[in-house]
Amino acid sequence: MSAKHVGLGRGLSALIKDSPASSAQDTAGTEGQGVTMIPVSQLHKSPWQPRRHFDPEALSELVASIRERGVLQPLLVRKAEDGYQLIAGERRFRAAQEAELKEVPVMVMEVSDKEAVEITLIENLQREDLNPIEEAEGYQSLADQFGMTQEQIAERVGRGRATVANALRLLTLPDAVQTMVAEDRLSSGHAKVLLGLEIPREQELLARRVLSEGLSVRSLERIVEKLRKPPRKPRSERVDIPAAHLQHLSDQLHQALGTSVRLTTSKTLSNGKKMPGRVEIDFYSPDDLDRLLQLLGIAEEL
């Protein structure tokens, strides 16, 4: 088991201690004890299975192995009205169906809905089979269906509360970004950085930029940091000519020159620096320009 999952060392039995399932789990490694064969047709998938993505190549390899050797590790199930409900081992169940097996070995456990969800989630977490979004949805299922707090979830699955909290935050990302994470096109590190933005559209656009430009997590952090900075306040400045007087001057020039004139006032910045104003006079032909030059007292040099 990797260091990442060291908190799961207690195994499934820790989740179902003080229940009849505990003794059944303890016999899982002893051939012939607590294991029975049931028809594949009587086995139904768990409604709480967190995994949605199954690697087709890995599944094909498992099918080939099962065809040759059968199902070596029993599936965990519980009784249901119309047969048995799968608790753990959906990959083996799917492979057994594809291999056209008639029966599979199972261990029948007496557990509640809550315990069944926990075991399903833990079984996948221990085997590192869940992508970050599936893991988060598993935690959310425990919170929604059984009212568990983040602290309670962390305790039951053997994770830190911060780990559970950070995983759940991924579910606030736009669906398109969650899909990128689930498909391993966008790392969970990138996703956590995107959570620093509040606007979903910005999160999605930036996620697509990560994919198109191959941005590292550090590069993304710098971009998000810039986006989160408040816009600079405009430097304080003082106009040298009030707007009302500027309009009056523009009208006077228009009447005197017989054409459109635009005035932009000069400005004085807070540091004392002067910004220039502008006078723009329209003309429409060389003759019109000559007329304006004469009005301004400027003789054209030949």
Image (cartoon, helix red, strand yellow):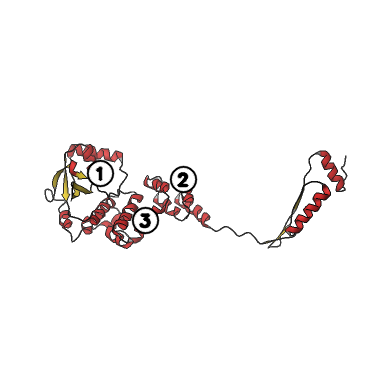
Residue 168: give its label.
3
Horizontal and vertical percent position of residue 156:
27, 59
Cα distance between the residues tagged 3 and 1: 25 Å
For image coordinates 48% across by 47% down, the residue present is 205
Element type at marker 2? helix
Query: Looking at the picture, which amino acid does disc 1 mark?
Result: Arg
Element type at marker 3? helix
The residue wearing badge 1 is: 91
Horizontal and vertical percent position of residue 294:
87, 45
Query: Looking at the picture, which amino acid does disc 3 mark?
Result: Leu
The crowd level at tag 3 (other Cα within 10 Å; few <14, some 14-19, many 20+) is: some
Cα distance between the residues tagged 2 and 1: 32 Å
Element type at marker 1? helix
The residue wearing badge 2 is: 208
Q: Quadrant of residue 52?
A: top left
The crowd level at tag 1 (other Cα within 10 Å; few <14, some 14-19, many 20+) is: some
Cα distance between the residues tagged 2 and 3: 22 Å
The answer to which of marks 2 and 3 sits earlier in the sequence is: 3
Seen in the picture, residue 63 relative to 36 is either above or below; the reply is above
Single out the residue that lies furthest toward the left: 32
Q: Is residue 2 left or right of residue 179?
A: left
Q: CB under 8 Å between callouts 2 and 1?
A: no
Seen in the picture, residue 170 relative to 42 is either above or below; the reply is below
